[in-house]
């Protein structure tokens, strides 16, 4: 004997029912089988919604009824040849008429009792089981229908009745011992009381019906056929990387389902557990997939955490007060009160001070629980020994589950630090006495992120997914996107990093794709995106609430750098090549650094100085390892290097600057480079990173440009002033050359003072042979007092800057 149960999706329409037929046909060849079926997918919800409308005396319920009627009739039309339809339609219409009468009754009296609700909810399974049995018969199977009400006896706790196993087991054993049919179809979920009243076994209860039958008939196996290929490490609909668990223990399955793995209704295990009947979870749509086997032991697995599940719709209720300390019996009364109200407690935590008890219950029960507990402790509350109950709803519980968790330290540490890093706020924590689960209550909006980050931490062999939100797709941004596209395979293989760009924006348009924007076609996607909006962009990043989110700023815009605080304050990392944030008022810089600490959110800006050269990173390492910077000497402007390396007595200064601008070596406004402002910003950032409290105005700048060039209000005016003062530029060149020196634009920091300016560099100096747009930095520190630590290399250009941003992202990935 085998019991097979087919869930709502598996029997949602004619096409799916045909799949069920072929599975049943195959399984029934060798043994008698019981086929437990759910209502057609979505029908139980529809019945409930329709009843609610009727009980509210809204005539809209008629429409709900019409939809349900149509659904059943159309399945019949799709399954049966016209000649066979009339008798089936006749019977179904008769049932539907009764249902309509019941709904009318609810409408007229304007209420739905729990008893009526059970009666009405039963129609889903009553109708589906009849249609499916008739279909099996018409396809030549030896099938008969047996009502769940005649097999399963319960008490009259409507909505979630308790099974009378003695009576039930006897009825089932008797029926199956005597039936001549190879296949018996039974409606799941529904049962009847001793007095014959319609009851139900709780939402999702068809699994339970099947388990009860399996236990009663001592079946060799219970097969749960559903729409996923087994029980997964997490709900596969929320965690794409979830993996199927091929073999787990009854206890693990119970914990996972108790904490929300809906694929199995929690009470299902109990009737099969005592007799060791295995449960197989299989996919109706991919019957060849292995699925999950649930048995007593799962020898040989060394995995500690087997799965992560969650339950939504949770309310936390806390009973607190000084009067609770040391008084025996308070918890007893508390839980008795809840039990009398039939409120099931999902999670319990009690502070060791005995000052408070905190429980997790379903949102639906919250108000009843609140009233009942307030009434039960009225006396203590009046005398202020206990505070009035507080509740917080719209929460969720997530739980790590696994048999082997008990003997491992550090799991909860890992769990909570992962959640913390991702800014998931934890309201309550509990660890089951069996130590088979650790659970935490979190906000509903954080569930997807929490599941995915925990899943990544515990199951994904250290493949870490980074979710990027990229602002700016110009020279640097465009190349950055190309680099991600090219490096993707390497990163995954060598660094275990999976990088996706979820959001992209330029100044005109923005686009989001939760599955990752196709990087070979980002231009198209962006063109078709919505109108760009910096605030909306941030709001969307926040709402999407992805783990390991990184905001990447490839612009030079102040408005964008002003938004960093919002990102960091939501624990979203920021990577930027935009210098504005770190070189504006010290207070702003300091504020950003504080946010980094407070929200544990990385803020990296390596490309602010020397493009892709690891200058800031090196400086950071020196400082954190206890070194102290005494002096920095540096040539930090790729643009000015280009200009002074190419300027001589055969060219004009004007032409060289023009060439630099045309080649993209300067900012669009070349005065930013030529005036030395850009270099000032860079040395300021290095000074601040070295620990100095400094403002831009503290930096001395001896400009080599004439006043007129500095004050030019357009590029044209600027260039014509350069022409005008050509003779002065030539003089500076001659003077240097005569001394065998070269002109370099140098930035210096010494004793907390910084200056920038054009210097004559003698042969033999580290700066003398600096080529093209190279940068160089000399760090004189406590550890490197005379011979400085030198970093030198290409320090400008879109490609190296893009690589620098990329390097920052990888730093975060390895963080
Ligand atoms: P049925 O109608 O067949 O009873 P359910 O909808 O009750 O199906 O249960 C199957 C669903 O359970 C899946 O579609 C999936 O979304 C959900 N689910 C939640 N957690 C898990 C998990 N850990 N493994 C597999 N499925 C899960
Ligand atoms: N149809 C019922 C429900 O939706 C029972 C089940 O499908 O398991 O809750
Ligand atoms: Mg189910």
Image (spheres, grey):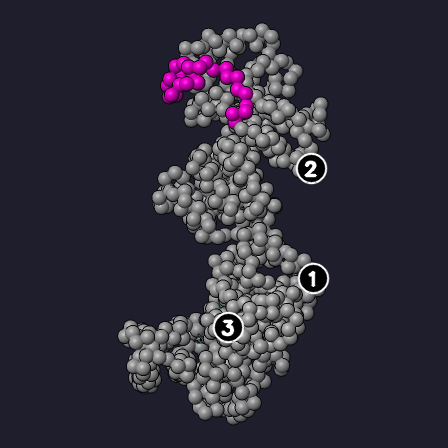
Q: Nearer the viewer, mark 2 or mark 3?
A: 3
1 and 3 marks in contact (CB < 8 Å) = no
Q: Is residue 751 magenta?
A: no
Residue at the image point whose x is 69% and y is 61% from the top? 408
Nearer to me, 85 or 435: 435
Instruction: First in sequence, mark 2 or 3: give its number.
Output: 3
User: Real-space Cα distance between discs 1 and 3?
Assistant: 40 Å
Q: Is residue 82 visible?
A: yes
How would you rate the neighbour count of disc 1 (Cα within 10 Å): few for under 14, some for 14-19, many for 20 or more? Answer: few
Q: Is residue 708 magenta?
A: yes
Disc 3 designates what residue?
A: 374
How would you rate the neighbour count of disc 3 (Cα within 10 Å): few for under 14, some for 14-19, many for 20 or more? Answer: many
> Disc number at residue 408?
1
User: Real-space Cα distance between discs 1 and 2?
Assistant: 33 Å
The magenta segment is 696-721
Residue at the image point whose x is 57% and y is 10% from the top? 736
Instruction: Name the quarter where the C terminus is drawn.
Output: top right
- Residue 318 vs 128, above or below: the answer is above
Disc 2 designates what residue?
A: 625
Image-quarter location of ligand 2: bottom left
User: Looking at the image, how many numbered discs can be counted on the residues?
Assistant: 3
Residue at the image point whose x is 48% and y is 73% from the top? 371
- Residue 104 vs 303, above or below: the answer is below
Residue at the image point whose x is 61% and y is 57% from the top? 415
Q: Nearer the viewer, mark 1 or mark 2?
A: 2
Residue located farthest toward the front when viewing the structure as drawn: 383
């Amino acid at each position: 004997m085998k019991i097979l149960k087919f869930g709502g999706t598996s029997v949602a329409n004619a096409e799916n029912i045909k799949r069920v037929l072929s599975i049943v046909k195959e399984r029934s060849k060798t043994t008698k089988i019981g086929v437990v079926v759910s209502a057609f997918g979505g029908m139980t919800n529809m019945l409930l919604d329709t009843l609610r409308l009727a009980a509210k005396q809204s005539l809209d319920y008629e429409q709900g009824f019409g939809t349900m009627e149509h659904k059943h009739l159309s399945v019949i039309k799709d399954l049966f040849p016209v000649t066979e339809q009339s008798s089936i339609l006749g019977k179904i219409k008769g049932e539907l008429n009764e249902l309509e009468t019941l709904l009318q009754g609810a409408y007229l009296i304007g209420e739905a009792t729990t008893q009526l609700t059970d009666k009405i909810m039963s129609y889903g399974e009553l109708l589906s089981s009849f249609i499916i049995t008739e279909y099996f018969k018409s396809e030549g199977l030896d099938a008969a229908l047996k009502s769940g009400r005649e097999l399963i006896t319960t008490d009259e706790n409507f909505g979630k009745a308790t099974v009378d196993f003695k009576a039930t087991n006897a009825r089932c054993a008797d029926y199956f011992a005597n039936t001549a049919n190879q296949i018996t179809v039974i409606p799941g979920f529904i049962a009847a009381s001793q007095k014959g009243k319609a009851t139900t076994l709780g939402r999702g209860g068809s699994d339970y019906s099947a388990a009860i039958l399996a236990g009663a008939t001592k079946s060799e196996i219970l097969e749960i056929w559903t729409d996923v290929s087994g029980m997964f490490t997490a709900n596969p609909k929320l965690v794409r990387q979830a993996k199927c668990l091929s073999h787990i223990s009854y206890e693990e399955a119970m914990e996972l389902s108790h904490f929300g793995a809906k694929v199995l209704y929690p009470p299902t295990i109990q009737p099969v557990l005592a007799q060791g009947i295995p449960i197989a979870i299989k996919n109706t749509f991919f019957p060849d997939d292995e699925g999950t086997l649930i048995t007593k032991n799962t020898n040989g697995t060394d995995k500690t955490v087997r799965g992560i599940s969650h339950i939504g719709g949770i309310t936390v209720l806390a009973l607190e007060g000084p009067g609770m300390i040391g008084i025996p019996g308070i918890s007893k009364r508390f839980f008795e009160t809840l039990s009398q109200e039939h409120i099931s407690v999902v999670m319990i935590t009690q502070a060791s001070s005995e000052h408070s008890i905190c429980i997790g219950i379903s949102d639906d029960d919250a108000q009843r629980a609140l009233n009942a507990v307030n009434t039960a402790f009225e006396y203590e509350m009046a005398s202020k020994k206990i505070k009035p109950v507080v509740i917080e709803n719209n929460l969720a519980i997530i739980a790590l589950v696994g048999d082997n968790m008990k003997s491992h330290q550090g799991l909860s540490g890992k769990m909570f630090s992962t959640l913390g890093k991702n800014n998931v706020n934890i309201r309550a924590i509990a660890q089951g006495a069996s130590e088979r689960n650790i659970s935490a209550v979190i906000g509903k909006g954080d569930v997807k992120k929490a599941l995915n980050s925990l899943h990544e931490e515990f199951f994904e062999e250290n493949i870490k997914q980074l979710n990027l939100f990229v602002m700016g797709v110009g020279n640097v941004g465009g190349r950055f996107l190309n680099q991600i596209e090219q490096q993707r395979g390497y990163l995954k293989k060598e660094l275990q990093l999976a990088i996706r760009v979820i959001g992209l924006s330029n100044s005109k348009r923005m686009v989001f794709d939760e599955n990752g924007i196709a990087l070979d076609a980002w231009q198209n996607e962006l063109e078709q995106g919505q109108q760009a909006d910096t605030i909306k962009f941030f709001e969307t990043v926040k709402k999407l609430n992805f783990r390991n989110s990184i905001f990447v700023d490839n612009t030079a815009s102040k408005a964008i750098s002003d938004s960093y605080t919002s990102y960091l304050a939501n624990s979203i990392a920021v990577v930027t090549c935009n210098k504005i944030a770190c070189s504006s008022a010290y207070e702003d810089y300091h504020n950003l650094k504080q946010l980094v600490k407070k929200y544990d959110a990385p803020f990296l800006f390596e490309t602010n100085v020397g493009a892709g050269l690891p200058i800031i990173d090196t400086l950071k390492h020196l400082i954190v390892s206890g070194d102290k910077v005494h002096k920095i000497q540096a040539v930090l402007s790729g643009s000015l290097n280009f200009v002074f390396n190419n300027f001589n007595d055969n060219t004009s200064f004007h032409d060289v600057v023009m060439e630099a601008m045309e080649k993209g070596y300067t900012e669009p406004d070349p005065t930013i480079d030529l005036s030395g402002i850009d270099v000032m910003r860079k040395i300021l950032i290095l000074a601040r990173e070295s620990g100095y409290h400094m403002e831009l105005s503290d930096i001395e700048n001896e400009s080599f440009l004439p006043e007129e060039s500095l004050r030019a209000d357009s590029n044209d005016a600027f260039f014509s002033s350069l022409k005008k003062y050509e003779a002065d530029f030539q003089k500076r060149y001659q003077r240097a050359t005569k001394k065998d020196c070269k002109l370099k634009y140098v930035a210096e920091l010494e004793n907390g003072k910084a200056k920038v300016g054009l210097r004559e560099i003698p042969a033999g100096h580290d700066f003398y042979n600096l080529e093209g747009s190279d940068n160089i930095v000399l760090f004189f520190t406590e550890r490197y007092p005379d011979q400085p630590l030198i970093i030198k290399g290409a320090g400008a250009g879109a490609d190296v800057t893009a690589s620098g941003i990329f390097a920052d992202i990888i730093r975060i990935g390895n963080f």
